[in-house]
Amino acid sequence: MMPKLRFLAAALLLANGAAANEPAKPVAQSRLGTGYLKPPAMPDALLLIGPPPADGSKALTRDHAGEVKALALQGTPRWQLAISDADLFTPKATASFSCAAGFVIGPAETPKIDAIMRKVGSDFGMSTYPVKNKYKRPRPFAGNGKPICTPDYENILRNDGSYPSGHSAIGYGWAMVLAEIVPNRRGKLLARGAAFADSRRVCNVHFKSDVEAGGVVANSVFNALLSDPAFVADLASAKAEALKRVKPECSAENAALKLTR
């Protein structure tokens, strides 16, 4: 198993519990690490979003239409970008937002920005688990039998609730944090956050409503972060670091995203 998949599998196992009826583990026990927010500062996702779309609903019909469109992208450059966006743990993970930010992001190039992104990743990702654990919605690939973009952790995902998408919450959240750091790139960053989140639908591991619900949760978590003194202090340091810029190479990402525009 490739390193990024092994680490993600471990994170999902620790976050969702070894058994289907086991409650989510504390954030500190997850590969996502420890975030900024502690109860009661962490928003309660169960109060923010309702259940996933019901059988026979227009929302579920919309989900299935989005599922069909996603399956048509398998093997394309957009599919390859979705594989890259699935990475949350390798040194290259935060670089997904380099093109949108206008400079290279990474542990070597921008250590403070990289560090704040990884730390808030825990807040955004883990915030979804109360809802995941309550509804345990099956993933789309469990119904359509088609490949997913990261097959090495298919068995893990089968036991991890689809609704809402934790990856999507991280993508939307990273975009909002970076928009505070580089406000003149806000539009590009938020668009990249939406694309990063939608990569989960392209991957055949989430429905459109899962992705959107992840965004709702992420927005509330972001607002809570803005009231956290440690986050605010780190954000100021990250803003200062953003003044040092190295231009990224973006041709492949631009080509991939044009497929869905």
Image: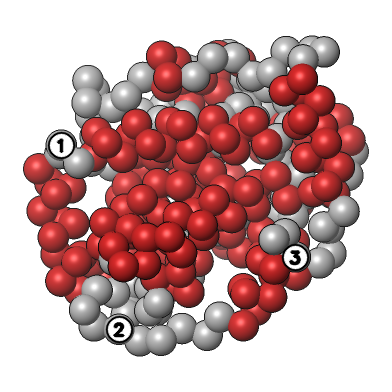
Residue under the image location 36 percent in, 19 percent down:
44
Upstream in the sequence, badge 2 or badge 3?
2
Say which mark, if any, is on residue 173.
none
Say which mark, if any, is on residue 245.
2
10 Å neighbourhood of mark 2: few (<14), some, or many (≥20)? Answer: some
Residue 98 point in image, percent of width and height: 44, 72
Above or below, comparing residue 153 to residue 95 in the picture: above
Residue under the image location 37 percent in, 60 percent down:
186
Upstream in the sequence, badge 1 or badge 3?
1
SS at badge 2: loop
Residue under the image location 31 percent in, 40 percent down:
222
SS at badge 3: loop
Give the residue number, with chain letter if any, for mark 3: 259
Give the left or right position of residue 170, taking residue 223 as reference. Answer: right
Q: Could you say which quadrant of the image residue 157 lies in?
A: top right
Q: Are marks 2 and 3 in contact (CB under 8 Å)?
A: no
Residue toward you, 4 or 43 = 43
Upstream in the sequence, badge 1 or badge 2?
1
Q: Is residue 158 visible?
A: yes
Amino acid found under the numbered disc labelled 1: Ser
Amino acid found under the numbered disc labelled 2: Arg
Give the residue number, with chain letter if any, for mark 1: 227
Q: Are marks 1 and 3 in contact (CB under 8 Å)?
A: no
Above or below, comparing residue 142 to residue 54 in the picture: below
10 Å neighbourhood of mark 1: few (<14), some, or many (≥20)? Answer: few
- In space, the residues marked 1 and 3 are separated at their CA atoms by 38 Å
Above or below, comparing residue 56 to residue 73 in the picture: above
10 Å neighbourhood of mark 3: few (<14), some, or many (≥20)? Answer: few
Give the left or right position of residue 139, taking residue 217 as reference. Answer: right
Residue toward you, 65 or 206 = 65
